[in-house]
Image (tube, rainbow, N blue to C red):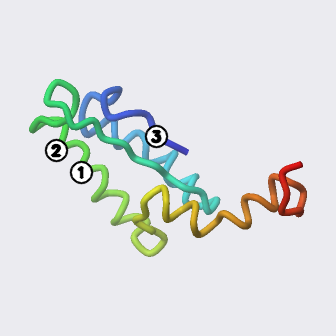
Amino acid sequence: MTLPPDTSLDDSSGYASLMVLVDDIVDRGGVVVVTLHPQPHQSANERGLGGFFDFLQAVVLRHGDALWHATPREIVERYADAMTARAWGGANRCC
């Protein structure tokens, strides 16, 4: 699940409110995707980056052992066979 974009969060308390969602996703073995908009008028400013880093530190403190910092490509490479099999009822085919 992709969390709401950083531009929709006002401050550290906005990120803190997402922790319940992160907890639930991690408990279910899901994937949490965190995005950041690097424009100064969005979150690439002192206030925005402060909230973002506070949120990441809180996630690491709560779920450090369960975290895998991966690129989207790494996720697909790791789970491609399982995703294909599940999508096609166990068969590795599309038609």
Nearer to me, 85 or 2: 85
Residue 3 - label: 3
Q: Residue at x 14, y 30 (%)?
A: 40
Looking at the image, residue 77 sits to the left or right of residue 81; the answer is left
Nearer to me, 64 or 44: 44
Confirm or deny contact between disc 1 and disc 2 (CB under 8 A): yes
Residue 27 in percent (x, y) is at 59, 61
Q: Which residue matches tag 1?
A: 54
Element type where label 2 sits in the image: helix
* Type of amino acid under label 2: Gly
Above or below, 89 relative to 9? below
Q: Residue at x 32, y 30 (%)?
A: 9
- Count of marks placed on residues: 3
> Which quadrant of the figure has residue 78?
bottom right
Cα–Cα gap, marks 3 and 2: 17 Å
> Which quadrant of the figure has residue 29?
bottom right
* Type of amino acid under label 3: Leu
Instruction: Answer with mark 3 or mark 2, whichever residue precedes in sequence.
Output: 3
Q: Residues within 10 Å of mark 3 (few under 14, many from 20)?
A: few
Cα–Cα gap, marks 3 and 1: 15 Å
Residue 50 - label: 2
Residue 2 - label: none
